[in-house]
Image (cartoon, rainbow, N blue to C red):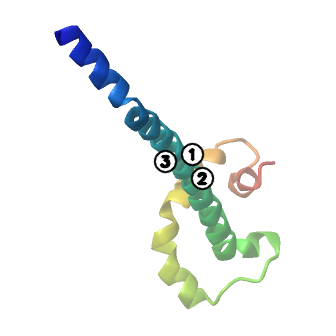
Amino acid sequence: MELKAKRLLWWASLPFRVLLEFHRGFELYYLQGLQWEEEELENVFALLLFGSYIGLPHPPSELTYRLLPHVLREIHVMQAKSTGKAGVKAGWIGV
């Protein structure tokens, strides 16, 4: 009798489990998309602040100094990329 009850419960919960797995997969895909979008926005933000190195017009200096604390992670990434012999600025642009 107990085995039949377990089987019945397993079959009754099957639609719920399928929907739960679908939700988990969709959530993972959605979160990966958000993470990629955040990284791209950080790149654009850094390009706005440091665009003068490649000839782009940049915002006023006062505004750049106010926004600088928000781009610290991007600065650390640039420093990590620029450990080569070519120099710091050459490492930033991937030379």
Given contact means CB atoms under 8 Å apart, are the residues at marks 3 and 1 in contact?
A: yes
User: 66 or 15: nearer the eye?
Assistant: 15
Q: Nearer the viewer, mark 1 or mark 2?
A: 1
Percent x, y of residue 61: 60, 87
Q: Amino acid at mark 1?
A: Tyr
User: 43 or 74: nearer the eye?
Assistant: 43
Q: Is residue 65 left or right of residue 85?
A: left
Q: Quadrant of the rendered structure where residue 21 is?
A: top left
Query: In this picture, is 39 found above or below 10?
Result: below
| Alpha carbon distance from label 3 to label 1 | 5 Å
Q: Residue at x 54, y 90 (%)?
A: 62
Please name the residue that numbered disc 3 is placed on. 27
| Alpha carbon distance from label 3 to label 2 | 10 Å
| Alpha carbon distance from label 1 to label 2 | 6 Å
Identity of the residue furthest to the left in this view: 2
Q: Amino acid at mark 2?
A: Gly
Badge 1 marks a residue whose secondary structure is: helix
Please name the residue that numbered disc 1 is placed on. 29
User: 54 or 23: nearer the eye?
Assistant: 23
Q: Is residue 58 left or right of residue 37?
A: right
Please name the residue that numbered disc 2 is placed on. 33
Q: Amino acid at mark 3?
A: Glu
User: 25 or 52: nearer the eye?
Assistant: 25
Given contact means CB atoms under 8 Å apart, are the residues at marks 1 and 2 in contact?
A: yes
Badge 3 marks a residue whose secondary structure is: helix
Mark 2 burial class by Cα count in 10 Å: few <14, some 14-19, many 20+: few
